[in-house]
Image (cartoon, rainbow, N blue to C red):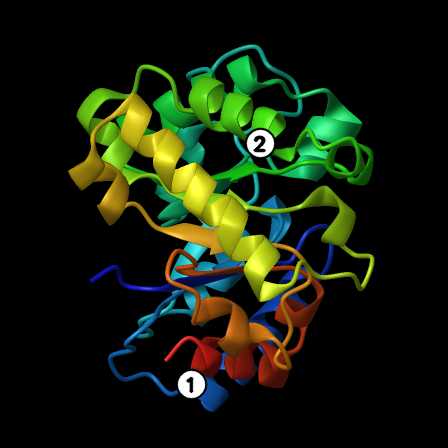
Amino acid sequence: MRTKIVAGNWKMNKTSAEGAALIAGIRKELGDGKLPVEVVVCPPFTGLDAAAKALAGSKIGLGAQNMHFEAPGAFTGEVCAEMLKALCVQYVILGHSERRTFFGETDAIVNRKTKMALAAGLTPIVCVGETLAEREANKTEKVVTTQVRDSLAGLGADLAKVVVAYEPVWAIGTGKTASPAQAQEVHALIRRVLAVISDGQTATGIRIQYGGSMKPENAKELMSQPDIDGGLIGGAALKADAFAAIVRGAL
């Protein structure tokens, strides 16, 4: 059985103080006991230290939203895996559609970041997904297959440590959501591609999150699908009660 994983991507929101307050609210909602679902919060870089302190004694994990693919060096404005580890970060989101769209990240770049994250002992949450134009042109299978194959190429046995997030770009921040059947169809496709680049047993064990406008109202139905193993949550992760409700929807 795959343990479901729900991660909150705060994007470019929350000051350090606001983030600490949000975490306090989430802890109040969920309690500090053992959770049957893996829960992660991913503040912006500026909030990681305060978040780590606010999470002390909690079962909730800490994630970053991005990282560079090089070791420390002359890369102005970037943050490396070593820096994240020093802040008690355990997870890192890589290849989010906003990184791909606005900052030109390619599958090759995501692949380099993923390898560096794994080498540092971080758990990468690697995002893939098609745009509305690609879906309407019936290119979903081709686009997602290529992204999975190329973003995760050459990982060997470490592939089993990766979390994949399917985020249909047309359903991010738009209020639109893939139907459970649509989401399940692509999640099943991703698992088939994972089996091709590794083996069936490895692919069966890898967790695949859904990341397109998951809300308390649709979380349970989405996560009840056989290949949907949690959610990568955007807007709803900025409210403690909504985020906690989504976590409970995974039970």
Viewer-proximal residue among 42 and 55:
42
Question: The N terminus lies in which quarter of the figure?
Answer: bottom left
Q: Position of residue 247 (x, y in %)?
A: 46, 76
In three-dimensional space, the C-alpha distance between marks 1 and 2, rounded to whole angstroms, equals: 37 Å
Q: Can residue 41 be seen at all in this image of the molecule? A: yes
Give the label on residue 30, or none.
Answer: 1
Instruction: Find numbered disc 2 in the image and state the secondary structure of the residue it sits on.
Output: helix
Q: Residue at x 78, y 31 (%)?
A: 137
Q: Residue at x 63, y 66 (%)?
A: 214
- In the rendered view, would you say 92 is above or below 174? above
- In the rendered view, would you say 148 is above or below 24? above
Instruction: Tell how many labels.
Output: 2
- Badge 1 crowding class, 10 Å Cα cut-off, few under 14, some 14 to 19, many 20 or more, is many
Locate residue 103 relative to residue 72 in the image: left or right.
right
Question: The C terminus lies in which quarter of the figure?
Answer: bottom left
Q: Position of residue 210 (x, y in %)?
A: 53, 55
- In the rendered view, would you say 66 is above or below 166? above
Instruction: Find numbered disc 1 in the image and state the secondary structure of the residue it sits on.
Output: helix
Viewer-proximal residue among 101 and 28:
101
Give the label on residue 58, or none.
Answer: none
Q: Position of residue 124 (x, y in %)?
A: 40, 39
The kind of residue on which mark 1 rests is Leu
The kind of residue on which mark 2 rests is Glu
Considering every residue shown, the one lying at the far top of the view is 74
In the image, which is nearer the foreground, mark 1 or mark 2? 2
* Image marks 1 and 2: residues in contact by CB distance under 8 Å: no
Q: Residue at x 67, y 71 (%)?
A: 236
Residue 193's image quarter? top left
Q: Residue at x 30, y 45 (%)?
A: 206
Give the label on residue 141, or none.
Answer: 2
Q: Position of residue 81 (x, y in %)?
A: 41, 30
